[in-house]
């Protein structure tokens, strides 16, 4: 899939078309975080629809508060009902943001309406580690923050990491409902470098310690149920740098 012409414009670093991708059914979402539309590096999400064996341009999403350096679309996840898009916000002092778009309309010709802008309770982005993974399933969103540390002034490579959990209530309001940060974590673990969510099962990667963790939701809390490790005797494989779960 190649970008449509009006998305090809960018600043000197290039639009980074495909920096993040997500797919659900006949629709795909493609992040273009350094797209320069109305502003420099404001970002966009290119929505494609499958028609036969082609994925044709369908819609373009932009943040309602589009501004210079927002980099909207640097991270993505998509379900049948929602699209969640990350923005770093390079050029201002705002915290990193996650934009939630709700799908509306006919199944074959939907639109996506911005429903919420979410921000973790603490600033978590560090320019040295540009990962800000997210996963959404049902009415739950999880946000990995591998460069978040418990101490001020800790370089990104020595960060502990955290995972933030957001939930949507019956009235359609999203709010942060918890932070997952096990007591056994150490500096440099990068807990939350990768996340994936399915129902009441959550997998979180911590490549700094060559492990991944399975958490299960019990009522309103997430309980550690298993630890996955590499079977190799050698250290520092970055096991858990990327994770996925299905069934």
Image (spheres, rainbow, N blue to C red):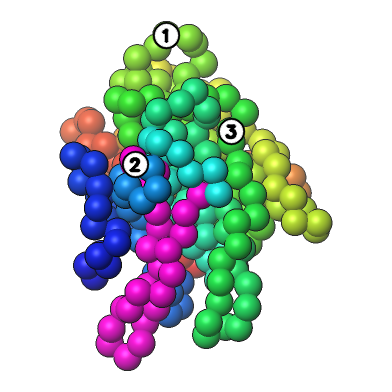
Q: Secondary structure at mark 1?
A: loop
- Identify the disc placed on residue 120: 3
- Residue at image position (58%, 53%) is 100
* Front-lying residue, 187 or 172: 172
To which residue does mark 1 refer? 153
Say left or right for 211 vs 148: left
Task: Tell me, yes or no, whether the two marked residues, 3 and 2, touch with CB atoms within 8 Å.
Answer: no
Task: Tell me, yes or no, whether the two marked residues, 1 and 3, touch with CB atoms within 8 Å.
Answer: no
Please report the bounds of the magenta region as a residue range. 40-63
Quadrant of the rendered image containing residue 50 = bottom left
To which residue does mark 2 refer? 41
Image: 39 above or below 137: above
Residue 240 coordinates in the image, percent (x, y): 34, 43
Instruction: Measure how far apart labels 3 and 2 are at the Cα level.
Output: 22 Å
Image: 176 above or below 154: below
Quadrant of the rendered image containing residue 206 = top left
Residue 172 coordinates in the image, percent (x, y): 75, 56
Image: 128 above or below 105: above
Task: Tell me, yes or no, whether the two marked residues, 2 and 1, touch with CB atoms within 8 Å.
Answer: no
First in sequence, mark 1 or 3: give its number: 3
Query: In the current view of this chain or complex, which residue is farthest to the bottom?
Result: 52
Query: In the current view of this chain or complex, which residue is farthest to the right?
Result: 171
Say left or right for 94 vs 194: right
First in sequence, mark 3 or 2: give its number: 2
């Amino acid at each position: 899939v190649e970008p449509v012409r009006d998305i090809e414009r960018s600043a000197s670093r290039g639009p980074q078309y495909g920096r993040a991708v997500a797919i659900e059914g006949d629709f795909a979402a493609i992040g273009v975080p350094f797209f320069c539309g109305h502003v420099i590096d404001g970002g966009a999400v290119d929505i494609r629809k499958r028609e036969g064996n082609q994925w044709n341009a369908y819609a373009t999403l932009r943040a309602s508060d589009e501004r210079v350096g927002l980099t909207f679309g640097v991270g993505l996840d998509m379900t049948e009902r929602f699209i969640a898009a990350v923005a770093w916000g390079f050029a201002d002092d705002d915290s990193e943001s996650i934009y939630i778009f709700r799908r509306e309309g006919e199944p074959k010709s939907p639109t996506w309406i911005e429903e919420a802008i979410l921000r973790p309770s603490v600033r978590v982005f560090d320019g040295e580690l540009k990962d800000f993974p997210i996963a959404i399933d049902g009415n739950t969103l999880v946000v990995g923050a591998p460069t978040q540390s418990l101490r001020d002034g800790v370089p990104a490579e020595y960060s502990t990491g955290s995972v933030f959990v957001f939930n949507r209530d019956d009235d359609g309001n999203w709010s942060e409902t918890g932070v997952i940060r096990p007591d056994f974590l150490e500096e440099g673990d990068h807990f939350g470098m990768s996340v994936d969510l399915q129902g009441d099962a959550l997998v979180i990667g911590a490549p700094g310690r060559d492990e991944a963790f399975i958490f299960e939701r019990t009522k309103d809390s997430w309980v550690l149920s298993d630890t996955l490790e590499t079977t190799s005797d050698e250290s520092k494989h970055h096991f858990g740098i990327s994770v996925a779960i299905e069934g």
